[in-house]
Image (cartoon, rainbow, N blue to C red):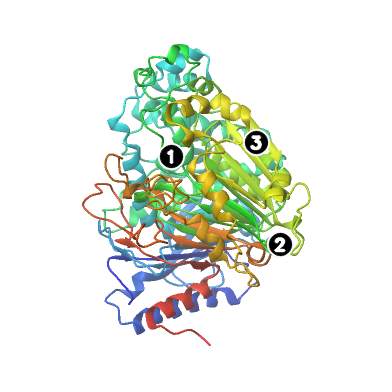
Amino acid sequence: MFRLSGAILSLVLVSLFCFSALSHGAEFQNHVEELRQLLRDAKLSIDVSSVVNLVSIYCSSSSSSSLNTNHAIMWGSTQFSYTFGRADNMAIATGIIYDGYSPTFNNQTSAVDGWMRLWVNTFTSANRGAHSDACYRSEANQRFASGMAEGLLTQPQIYNFFQNQYSNWVFAKKTYSMDMMRSRFGSGHEWVKSYDRLVSSSSRMQQQEIPREMMKRGLAQSASHSTSYYYPAALIAYMQDNMNWLETQVQQNPQNAYWIEIERILNQFHGLVEGYTIRANTEKNEIYGKLNWLDLYFLNSAGDMETLEGAIKDSNENARSASFKNNGGIVLPDEETLTDCSALIKITPDCRNLFAGHTTWRGFNIINKMYKVYSLMEDGIASQTVAFASSPSFLSSKDDFYVTQHGLVTMETTNDVFNTNLFQFITPHSVMCWMRSIVANRLAKTAHEWVTLFGLYNSGTYNNQWMALDYNKFTPGQCQLPSDSLWILEQIPGTVMTKDVTPILNNQTFWSSYNIPYFEFIYNISGYPQAKEKFGNDYDYNLCSRAQIFRREQAKIGSNKGKPVDFKDFGRVLQFNEWKTDQFSNMDPSKSISSRYDLRVSPQRAFAFGGIDTKVADYTKVKKSTSMWGICGPTHQDPVQTPPFSWSDKWNVTHLGQPQTYDFDWVDLEDVESFYESLKNKLFGIKKN
């Protein structure tokens, strides 16, 4: 039975299409009408026109469109306009949204499979050159327009997700200070200098200054108001200085492919902010408050924030360890940390397939999953199309899990940094992790190129083990992968280390990753030996629970002789949690591949935290469709040991725009037609012949 209560699954399709492809406007209009009719036939008590809608964006200078557009948006010398509800073939950008969103603070969402969906496409370079209008020929305009279309269509989802994420930061309940950074690393440290410049001003507006590029482009709507949210001054200083430094590097390196891609990312971000702001300013229901560029920059930097926030906690908190001064700057928490993510790569026993998968760990109140595919037809990049699991507003994955058009799968799991001496290498004059992942995915043709690109301009924030798997190296039926098939990179502030670990993958037929550094140097300098001494084998690379569970469970993949390995057989390992009976979990549901901290019992502390999804790709998905399979929500693979998670009064956390219960199954995250058939089957129990 199809459940509908408040906000249902969001499907967003944003497609910037070629002017000469005259069928596209009609196709998008048809998609809208088909989805609307499907909902009408189901006789659901909803306003169908608000559930399924579309937006068209035009270069106003060439808008011979028969549609009435509204709101002129200036971006530099270029003027855009947009209209909701209709499409024609003069649009530079057209978007479709399937969104049962209800404009109330209602936490109830029903969904087909728990995933929102977003596609973004742009002009091909050939059609750009043939177009008579300079607006259409500009890559900068198209990247800005792609962000603006996304902001216009997903503003309500972004607002919900921001509220959920901001509630987790709880800045006002913590004490922050630059005293430790200043006393240990000096007033000449770039971050300290940024902070001093900020606090020397008494003007609130100056404390939230507008980036130079936004001022130059005249983005008045998104720049005209200050944020309504509190951030520590040290973090504001970092974000502002970082944005200005990036803009300076872009201006000074106009021919450098790396900085060209950074400029494109900034253009897309500025478009996202502008689109969001336009929708927020015109939304009649004012419960969706305004967010400015700083709010959305913080949100896009959520992974990097995990490190930045920890670096400026009050020095008294950092000094609570009695041995701090004599322990090389190592500061250990009172209890084990909430680490992020599990990952697995596996050559099947018959050597016919190569799987890669990832389970994201995070607070359940920020599940809000959105599958995105960006097809950005720009020059000078290796992968014009990148598919990734993400969340509203993120231009990167943050999970992280990507499939690139050039045949790479890239993903990460997060490592802790207990050594506070390393914080001296954190500087706003760097490129944050989320941007570096986008650059590497766009520019890299090989796994080795990917780790090389990602390692440039290391910010020392969101310190992960990254895996780059090159499917171009894999030949079905051949059991030994050639060199350079799998590279890993581990990052800490001030250092990155890389290695071709293909020989290990060949030898043991799998590679697993679980929040403990592989490189001995990274392991030691980060403070893991001290953590192991305090907490035991949970911080041992070979003996922690997930290392042992991965070794045991991966060996069962393909155990059904004579039958090809199904993606669910592989995905089962990444959804695994049999904490009541598994000797390696030791009766703790947090100590498994897909953790469930919410199921902990006294004396363990329970949190609404753990594995929130699994994504799986294989040779066919990567090489033929640049897509993946996915399952949304905390694991419920074993309904006795891990029942589906439901929100209740037990969890007093903000979780806007989420379903009441996460009991979804696996889904093929491929295209809008696949979703249409899935929705029809869910509504009526039938499939198209």
Q: CA distance from mark 2 to mark 3?
A: 32 Å
Question: Do callouts 1 and 2 mark residues in contact (Cβ within 8 Å)?
Answer: no
Q: Nearer the viewer, residue 577 or 464?
A: 577
Which of the two discs, 2 and 3, labels the residue nearer the N terminus? 2
Q: Amino acid at mark 3?
A: Gly
Specify which label sits upstream in the sequence, 1 or 2.
1
Q: Quadrant of residue 71?
A: bottom left
Identify whether 529 is placed above or below 106: above
Q: Is residue 415 left or right of residue 293?
A: right
Q: Could you say whether the residue bearing mark 1 is in a helix, strand or loop?
A: helix
Where residue 455 is drawn, which disc sits there?
3
Q: Amino acid at mark 2?
A: Cys
The residue that label 1 is drawn on is 298
SS type, badge 2: loop
> Is the C-beta separation of discs 1 and 3 under 8 Å?
no
* Residue 5 seen anywhere in this rendered image of the structure: yes
Which quarter of the image is occupied by the N terminus? bottom left
* Front-lying residue, 334 or 82: 334
First in sequence, mark 1 or 3: give its number: 1
Residue for point 70% across, 51% down = 381
Q: Position of residue 556 (x, y in %)?
A: 57, 59
Res 254 visible:
no
Residue at point 62%, 57% (across, down): 376
Q: Secondary structure at mark 3?
A: loop
Give residue 197's position: percent from left, percent from top. Answer: 45, 20
Residue 601 against residue 185 in the figure, above or below: below
- The answer to which image quadrant residue 137 occupies is bottom right
Q: CA distance from mark 1 to mark 2?
A: 44 Å
Q: Is residue 382 above or below residue 543?
A: below
